[in-house]
Amino acid sequence: MKKTVAVLLMLLLLLGAGFFLGLSVGSMETSYRTIAQALFAYEVSDITHFSIIHLRLPRLLLAFLTGASLAFAGYLMQALVNNALADPYLLGTASGASLGASLSYFFFAEVTVLGLHLPPLFAFLGSLAVTLVVVLLGSKRGHLIPSQMLLVGIALSSLLVALVSLIMFLSESESQLKSVVFWSMGGFEKADWSNLGYPATALSLSLLIFFFLQKHLNVLLLGAERAETLGVDVRFIRWVMLLTVSVVTGFAVAFSGPVGFVGLMVPHMVRAVLGTANRFNLLATALAGGLFLVFCDLLSRLIYPPAGLPVGIVTSFFGVPFFVYLLRRKNYRFN
Amino acid sequence: MNNFKSQAWQGNLLVCVGLLLALISCEGKKPASSSAASSANHTVQDDLGRDVTLPVHPQRIIGLAPSMTEMLFAVADTATIVGRTQNDDYPDAALSKPVVNNYPMDYEGLLALKPEVVFAPEGIISTEVATQIQKLGIPVYFQKYDSVADILRGIRDLGKLLQREAQANALADSLRQRLDAFASEAQEMQKPKVLGIIWRDPIYVHGYNTIFSDKLRYAGGQNAVQEVFAQQSPALTREYILQLNPDVIIGGTFEEFDQNFFTLYPELKRINAYKNKRIYDVTDDLISRPSPRVVQSIAELKNVLR
């Protein structure tokens, strides 16, 4: 318990540091005093204040929410299919979203309609539609069959990736290609106060629900049959997990693109540190995922100013070596 | 003993190299007029520093990009132009030439047109594709333009390669006169900061080291982007653009930008270009094609900057 508290505190502390650094990095020189003034004595006409509050802060929050959502969804997904290789995109979320986003980039010259930005909308709808198909094909009479769902998800993803490639191939303009490529590598540049509400609400609600269901999750890791004998309503809990994963991942991907690796790696890292059955695992996973992306985004902007490298590149570059180290060091077992 | 051997060997090598060099230079210096036969070849260096061996009097040529076709129509004997790509639509005469796809490259279609040499601007055709074309026995000559002056140099170079020097130089000279006139008029202008937006999601723009910046100078403006990035058309953040605070945006009409760009990035409504409604659409083809029409492009820019 002591260790858990220490780890959670450290995560919060690092997160604070990450936000502070994140607020001070940008095209405009910003002193610590300016940040404090922007936060506590905001001056509308000051362009630096404006940048800190309306550009840097939402960007940080979006990075945090995306990382937290993906890591959280990854944790659930790994428990759902009881497989260490599972990530939030297993249900075709990422490829469905990619198809949606590509369609909007290629077939609608106007990227906004009635004030709605089309690519995230299409991406969200795409991810949900594909998840629905995977679930329909991966279940029998209301029972989810994880192994079948997994296979259907992978097969459908390949099909969708092929469709996206086809659209890209048929594209006339290099710019459209760039849009899709940029989108597919993930990024937080379009962060805006108005679109933070969706992922924030989805994530906090799900965290709350699963704070009470955490015990059932741990039992589920022992296998469906044993969980059933221990009194867990496996069918019900699987559906709740599925719904949560698709909505939380859908929002994350819609606004930030399919950032890779966070959803696979962070849950393992947390389990390696806190153990597989800790009741604060989900909270720690969300915090660690958010923290990881906040730092990756910061790094991307420092390496390649001003726009930053696509964050998906950075996550793999710095995450993979650390991940391998952690797996090798601990006698880590998934379940 | 060993030492001596190796010296002798080196000597032999030197002789060989010398002979080779002599051969190559003979080839290069062969007077163009001596053989009217179109089979005579010479080796020249293109703008990428590649050695290209092409006929001294090419009778069948093709440009593999819209800008290159414009260049060729301005300089070459148009009867020698054997085709165009799917995107080449200027001048009108180009439209009557057979089409060969350049993306993806239609190698068979190209072969069928039997060009003796292919001209391509750097960037549109990759060197990989060029290597493939050369394997088919067709030399590829690249031109590269970083400034307006490079376009004029490209015209003169084409004149030499196609034995149309008089034509090419006359054209380049007249373009030079127009440019000089632009330059002297530009001195009296306000030099507004202009941001040339290529794409809005992600936002990427015409960078500093580009023909675009050069054109703006002639047109009496300046590129709002004054920093050199790794990419010619860098992606920018909203914060960076806020800081630039451009006076003018090029890339679409005010209405288009108001509905799209500024709904997507409402934070940017603070910049001068939006406040003063100085957002203009210019002809895409003129902006993107490095061709003799560069003066028209400058005139168009000047029109909106005035």
Image: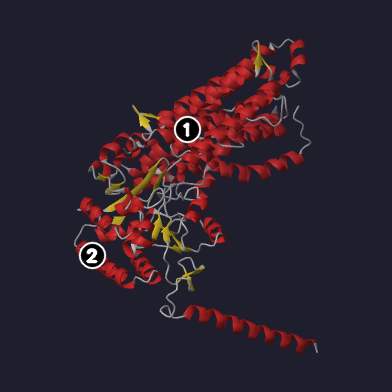
Quadrant containing the N terminus of chain A in the rendered view? top right
Q: Where is residue B219 in the image (x, y as percent from the top left)?
A: 25, 58
User: Hey, which quadrant is residue A275 in on the image?
Assistant: top right
B97 displayed left or right of A235: left
B93 displayed left or right of A200: left
Up-down: is A53 above or below B47? above
Quadrant containing the C terminus of chain A in the rendered view? top right
Residue A255 visible (yes or no): yes
What colouring style does the render use?
Answer: secondary structure
Element assignment for label 2 = helix
Q: Position of residue A10 (x, y in %)?
A: 62, 36
Q: How many marks?
A: 2
Instruction: Pick the residue in front: A250 or B43.
Output: B43
The tag on residue A101 is 1
> Residue type at mark 1?
Ala
User: Hey, which quadrant is residue A40 in on the image?
Assistant: top left
Marks 1,2: beta carbons within 8 A: no
Q: Where is residue B24 in the image (x, y as percent from the top left)?
A: 54, 79
Q: Name the residue under label 2.
A: B178
> Residue type at mark 2?
Arg
Tell me the chain of label 1. Answer: A
A73 displayed left or right of A172: right
Are discs 1 and 2 both within one chain?
Answer: no
Q: In whole angstroms, how far apart are the C-alphas of marks 1 and 2?
A: 46 Å
Residue B226 visible (yes or no): no
B183 displayed left or right of B199: left
Dot 1, how many residues are within 10 Å of its Cα: few (below 14), some (14-19), or many (20+)? many
Instruction: Pick the residue in front: B129 or B95.
Output: B95
Q: Residue furthest front?
A: B37
Disc 1 or disc 2, which is closer to the eye?
2
Tell me the chain of label 2. Answer: B
